[in-house]
Amino acid sequence: MIEVAVAQLGVDRTTNSPVVILREREGTRVLPIWIGPAEASAIAMELQGVKFQRPLTHDLLKQVIVGLGGSLQHVYIRSVQENTYFAELLIRRGEDAFQVDARPSDSIALALRLKAPIFASEGLLGEGDDDGSGGEGEPSPDDAAADALKRYLEQLDPEDFGKFSP
């Protein structure tokens, strides 16, 4: 697991889709993740310190976690399958810890609100096992799709993305 931070929020000019760019804290590798407009807006509002009179969805989830005596320990963006990223929240309440499956965009928006660290799998940042086999046997179709996406992402320049504004 590599700790990352939101480096930029923009719009992919080729698809006109919002994209959040995560950068490793102790390095220069990036992980762009295409997200929905509502999630991009939630991330942008938190980054800009915009607060509403009534809680939005991510604010509500923050209040539920805190109100139940829990804390968000971290977010982990763990894998990509068929161009879909998967993340999990690690929530702790007392001695109990809960892993909750979540979309990376929602996880990032929540982590920003709760000041929790965000981690990404080493392989998503382009290092690790480069033979596409995942360490054992023949490559799977998911590994091939992940490799194709990885090659595409490595060719992207953050300057190719426009700025996103809510």
Image (cartoon, rainbow, N blue to C red):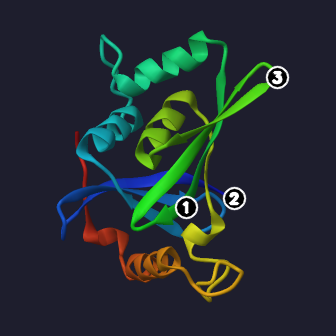
Image quadrant holding the C terminus, namely: top left
| Disc sitting over residue 95 in the figure | 3
- Count residues near mark 1 (Cα–Cα under 10 Å), then give few for <14, some for 14-19, many for 20+: some
CA gap, disc 1 and disc 3: 27 Å
Compared to 16, does 53 lie above or below? above
Picture quarter containing residue 158?
bottom left
> Which of disc 2 and disc 3 is earlier in sequence?
2
Q: Amino acid at mark 1?
A: Ser
**Of discs 1 and 2, which sits in the foreground?**
1
Picture quarter containing residue 54?
top left
What residue sits 50% from the left and 36% below the top?
Answer: 112
Q: Is residue 111 left or right of residue 12?
A: right
- Count residues near mark 2 (Cα–Cα under 10 Å), then give few for <14, some for 14-19, many for 20+: few
Q: Amino acid at mark 2?
A: Met
Compared to 98, does 136 lie above or below? below
Residue identifier under label 2 = 1
Residue identifier under label 1 = 79
Element class at badge 1:
strand
> Which of disc 3 and disc 1 is earlier in sequence?
1
| Disc sitting over residue 139 in the figure | none
Picture quarter containing residue 128?
bottom right
Q: Amino acid at mark 3?
A: Glu
What residue sits 66% from the left and 24% below the top?
Answer: 71
Element class at badge 2:
loop
